[in-house]
Image: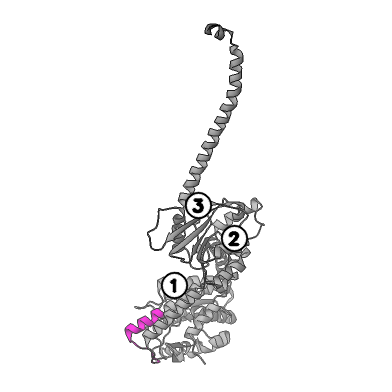
Amino acid sequence: MNLLNIFSELDYKAIIEGSLTNLIPTIIAGGFALFVIDKMTSYIRISKKMESYGFKGTASKKGFSKTDIKKMCKDTERLDIIFVSGYGFFSANKTPLKKAMDKGMHIRFLCAQVDNHFLTDIENLEVEQKNRKSGTKISEEIREIVNEYESYILDINVVEQYLNKIKQLEQLDIEQGYLENGKDIKKEIEKLCKQLEYYKREKKMEIRYYSTEYRLPFILSQSKPSKGKITTKVWLNITLPPYKSVENFMLTGERVDDINKDEGDFNFIEMMEEHFESIWNKASLTLGENEIKKESQYKNWEELLKSSSERMIKSRQTGKGLLIEVAAQHPLDEGKYPNEEFSKRLDKAIELYNRLNQSGESVYIYVPGSIHKNNEVVDELSLSGAGKNYLVEKGISSAVIYSDEMNVKYKGDQGVYNSTDECYVATQIFEEMKFKQIYCVCSPAQLLRKAFSYIKFGTLPYFEVANAETLHHSYVDEYFKMIPLLLSDDKALQLDSELGEEIRKCRKPMK
């Protein structure tokens, strides 16, 4: 049989069908293998890319276990943490975190400033998603954390007290080079510096409050140096409100730095570090008020002003006589004479008294101010006494002058030691004597603070300002320091106001 006959007798259909039957699975298997290889290559490529950024993997969305926290704190020198409130993290992990701080670990915590619209918006989103109980406030959660960790937190007010004292001594060193009690100023400064550094070391936690810089919550853990290396671990929470942090997932990462070598390539961990530092340097040092509190404060003072204005309209209709309050000013010259600025106010009061007397009204003058000290030197007379003597010498009858007796009657042992004390006593006199109108003579710089003080007590004077070449009160200090202090003190520096008591201690002689 020749080859032609062999080929002509072959069953080509069967051959083709058999070949295709065997080839199709091979093609499918090969295609699947290529698909898997391509996918694996893609995953490996993504994995390597993520690793090049510093990320090692992901963590459970259920939050940190006790074991996780122990590992996080072990051999850790510092934790840098940024959250909205950190309530869940710090509440759930109080014991291990406090133990770690007791052993020397430091925490820097960035959280949102309280009482602002940013937090209100988050609260509303979470309530709608049923992730938050209606009526609960993130601001209160932040305050709760601050209270819980209070004994560990560095108090910026204490730091400022040290720094101010050091600054005062440095200025004194420039001026005279010794202390009045014979102590060496430089040694005193050195002593205070050491005390400040000790205080900073002992307080293992610092908190600062941001307003708008927040992006994603994360934790940075920096280890203590070991064998010339520092390990930085990170937990970056990928979170999208209204879902809370525990309902999202985290990327975890690690970077090992050789202390003796330059840093490696820039990665995402370094970005997180830079992000934290930039916010830390700009964040507020104190838990303060913001938009919502200011809006509430505005409405409150608006109501007080309205009430005071209505009250004064009624007094002018039913009252009799006029009262002039002359804002006192310390220190006295030689401990018994009004200084230049105080004298100008008294002169302005005399001018006003004479003008009002011509209208046929009965006019009385109140000169406030208990006995003061200046640089630990106690005055011979009270401000009231010195002012009264000045007025009498200028021809004003002592019968129309209220002075020390009113300080004692309305302030007792507390005395009259600030502008608000003056306004309080003047208001009490005005009410008891049922005067028609009250006038206030003061420095132009202190007028607004005096006005707020009077409004707080329900009165609203007519103001007269007495200018002087040199003013004791600074316009800048009044606006940025004194008025905010008054507005923020619900007790208006009276009764058991801590701020009011601090001011009195600076000016009131010890018995």
Q: Is residue 174 magenta?
A: yes
From where the camera sits, is residue 209 visible?
yes
Tell me residue 80's x, y (percent).
50, 63
Task: Kindly give the residue lying farthest to the front in the view shown.
Answer: 1
Residue linked to disc 1: 478
| Amino acid type at image mark 3 | Phe
Q: How far apart are marks 1 and 2 (CA)?
A: 51 Å
Q: Are marks 3 and 2 in contact (CB under 8 Å)?
A: no
- Checking the image for residue 68, the label placed there is 2
Residue linked to disc 3: 55
Q: Is mark 3 on a helix, strand or loop?
A: strand
| Amino acid type at image mark 2 | Asp
289 relative to 168 in the view: left or right: right
| Amino acid type at image mark 1 | Glu
Badge 3 crowding class, 10 Å Cα cut-off, few under 14, some 14 to 19, many 20 or more, is many
Tell me residue 334's x, y (percent).
39, 91
Tell me residue 256's x, y (percent).
46, 59
Question: Could you tell me which residue is drawn at 46 percent across and 75 percent down?
Answer: 159
**Which stretch is magenta?**
166-182
Q: Distance between the residues labelled 3 and 1?
A: 52 Å
Q: Are marks 3 and 1 in contact (CB under 8 Å)?
A: no
